[in-house]
Amino acid sequence: MAVYTPEPLPLSIDPVLAEYLHRELMRISNTFIGGTEEVGAIDYQPHDSDLDAISALTTQAYGRNFLTYASEAAFKASVNLETGVDFNAFSAVLAATTAAFTTAQQTKLSGIATGADVTRAPLDVIALIITDWNTALDNGWYMGNAAANAPSAAWYLGFVEAHGAAGYRTQTVHAFTTDSSSNTLVWRRDQQSGTWSSWYRLRWSEEEQNAVLGTALPTGDTIARRDGSGDITARLFRTEYFSLYTGAYILTQNAVGVGADNYARPMPLANLIALILPTYGAVGSYIVGYIYNVGIIENTNYAGSLIEPAGFSGSTVSIADDAQSAESMTKGGAALTGTWKSLGRSNCNPGSNFGRSTLFQRIA
């Protein structure tokens, strides 16, 4: 390192004084330019790169004033910060909450879109993603892939209808990645007093309802569906209607019309015979009748007052099979009532005073 050497002093100065001054100047000058003599170690600043960088900054008067503040109070007064306006007052509760904040909680918050209302997340732009359907409790739309407590390990999208009382709600979901019009894969369950029911299947499309619930054809293991005319086709009918009768039965209907007792019931044959064979003289009954002085034309109605019960009588000798015999017509008894239809013809010598007979049926 170079050593500074002062110029010699003028000869007019006293030699002793000149020598002293020369030595002092050398000592002092060598100290300030890095000489080896140790003098005034606290009177100079060693070279520092940070100080060089600071000295190179272009500063303003406002910033340089910070270096002159003598106390913290002077600094606060200068920057004019107000509690509750420029910053919040210290809160021990907030400090404790911040200290307990976990990475998992931070991850949850990071998944919320900026500006989203967390109180309405289930009704946001998209369904709320969940990992357990037991946690989908509020009104809204939810979705989850292989979420716990789902109908199966699939992607399900659905909605929740929450009742006002705690522990009462309904969930309806469908496997939206694998469903179709023939299989909507819709499921529902409800919560009663905090207890979830099992998932049960809903069939929403017309196609899957027709396939499962009904057909107009007599196909086994299906529910009968009316055809375009309102009729139902079936293979066989069974009835377990209780009857006190025994023996053979036929299926009959007691009445017709809306609101009537029009149920189909089993009827014993004896009851049917009683209906088919009415009592003597009743509507529907038959009789061989006699009419005097009136020709009988088939399929013609006659007053019952003209007709008397009639029959035929032969000889007292038994007639052999296939033999001929002269028979006589007989009549007697009270005249009939109502209206009767002739089922035969006896119109010989019309207009003459003849008695005539044929089979009649009462129609009224």
Image (spheres, rainbow, N blue to C red):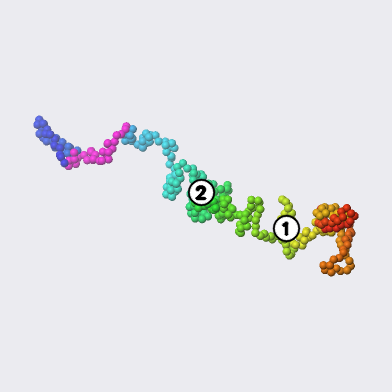
Q: Identify the residue at horizontal 25%, vertical 41% (top origin).
A: 48
Query: Callout 2: helix, strand or loop?
Result: strand
Dot 2 amino acid type = Tyr
Residue 193 among magenta residues: no
Quadrant position of residue 22: top left
Q: Which mark is residue 133?
A: none
Percent x, y for residue 141? 52, 47
Crowdedness near tag 2: few (<14), some (14–19) or many (≥20) residues, C-alpha within 10 Å:
many
Report if residue 317 is visible in the image. Answer: yes
C-alpha gap between disc 1 and disc 2: 57 Å
Q: What residue span does the magenta drawing correspond to?
A: 33-61
Q: Is residue 18 left or right of residue 288?
A: left
Number of numbered discs: 2
Report if residue 149 is visible in the image. Answer: no
Q: Residue furthest top?
A: 12
Residue occupied by mark 1: 252
> Depth check: 302 or 19 in front?
302
Q: Identify the residue at horizontal 84%, vertical 56% (top origin).
A: 346
Quadrant position of residue 315: bottom right
> Depth check: 210 or 314 in front?
314
On screen, residue 329 above or below 226: below
Q: Which mark is residue 142?
A: 2
- Of circles 1 and 2, which is in front? 1
